[in-house]
Image (spheres, rainbow, N blue to C red):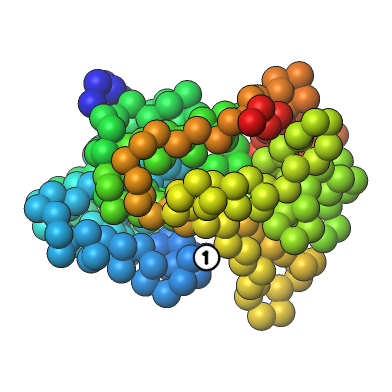
Amino acid sequence: MTTTQSHSNSSNEEQSSISLQKRARIGRNRSLKQMNQRFGASAVSDAITGRLRTEKIVRILEIGFGEGRVLMEVRLLFPYSSVLLYGINHQPEPTMSCDEHFLDTSEAYNICPRSEAAKLPLPHSYFYDAGSGLDFEDNFFDVIISQVSFPFVVEKAFLIEEIWRTLKPGGKALIHLDSYENDYPHMLSAGTNREMPTPRFVIYRHGRIFAISHLFNLLKTKGFAINLVRSSEMPPHSPRPSYTESLMKVDKNRSERLSLGLELDRISTLDLKKVRADESMELSRVYWGVMSVFNLTV
């Protein structure tokens, strides 16, 4: 592992002045409960517990860890020194720019008092574009998780290959690939399959849309245990229209490298935030993340 950890000179006093209300507006405060709602009750804990049965050291990575809420909630559940936690964010933010800020997160979200959190092994934070590659050795992690962050990555195909590479044999990954709402405009619905919609992960083959479900079926025929799961559950009385999430579950069952055979079309790929005419809530709900367009070359 060669990445140098990022550090910050931000004082604890400055960090403490950031209110919980402001943190919520930042939108980087997703919880372990929300992660488990996506993937099933106790999905993350079960994956970690399963690895602890066979491994002396268990390493967990969260891609897009936000303010580190999930990592600190996991830390409280698994306070052992044999469980090592890692997180990658694209860039540092006022509420998360160094390992020390996990203490503030723990207190801000009532995970545990700061004094208690200080006694726990803190997660290791890294700040770079995960889509450029995961700067860790092969077969390094036991569990890799991510929610909401993957749709913001440009090089989505390469990141999936990197997740496979850095997982240990028998390791698991739980990745939220994309979200879709039935009232999305044409530009976000024309290039996707309604059965498994991924408007920010578009694939073409011979000039025609190639459903992502077909890609994953191809991987299955090659023996890779990578499954695409559709989740369409929303809280009762939600004001949002019909909402679907596409999730990826990985069980590393082979030692060989994974190659998706996808080539990024940089001309067609689009940062959706740039489409917004303004920052209204309605436009922000639709135009977020990066619409990555690929050509299947195999």
Vertical arrangement, residue 101 with respect to residue 45, above or below: above
Q: Which residue is mark 1?
A: 38
Residue projecting furthest to the right: 186
Looking at the picture, how far across and down is residue 221, in whole percent? 54, 51
Q: Can you say which quadrant of the picture contains the C terminus?
A: top right
Nearest the camera: 44 or 102?
Answer: 44
The residue located at (24%, 21%) in the rendering is: 2
Nearest the camera: 73 or 157?
Answer: 157
Describe residue 191's horizontal placement relative to residue 64 as left or right: right
Describe residue 99's horizontal placement relative to residue 198 as left or right: left
Looking at the picture, how far across and down is residue 130, in whole percent? 45, 31
Describe residue 144's horizontal placement relative to residue 50 as left or right: right
Residue 124 appears in which quarter of the rendering? top left
- Can you see residue 86? no
Nearest the camera: 29 or 167?
Answer: 167
The residue located at (27%, 45%) in the rendering is: 168
- Can you see residue 256? yes
Describe residue 47's horizontal placement relative to residue 277 as left or right: left
Nearest the camera: 297 or 266?
Answer: 297
Q: Can you say which quadrant of the picture contains the N terminus?
A: top left
Vertical arrangement, residue 252 with respect to residue 290, above or below: below
Label 1 residue SS: helix
Vertical arrangement, residue 62 with respect to residue 157, above or below: below
The residue located at (35%, 46%) in the rendering is: 254
The residue located at (30%, 68%) in the rendering is: 46
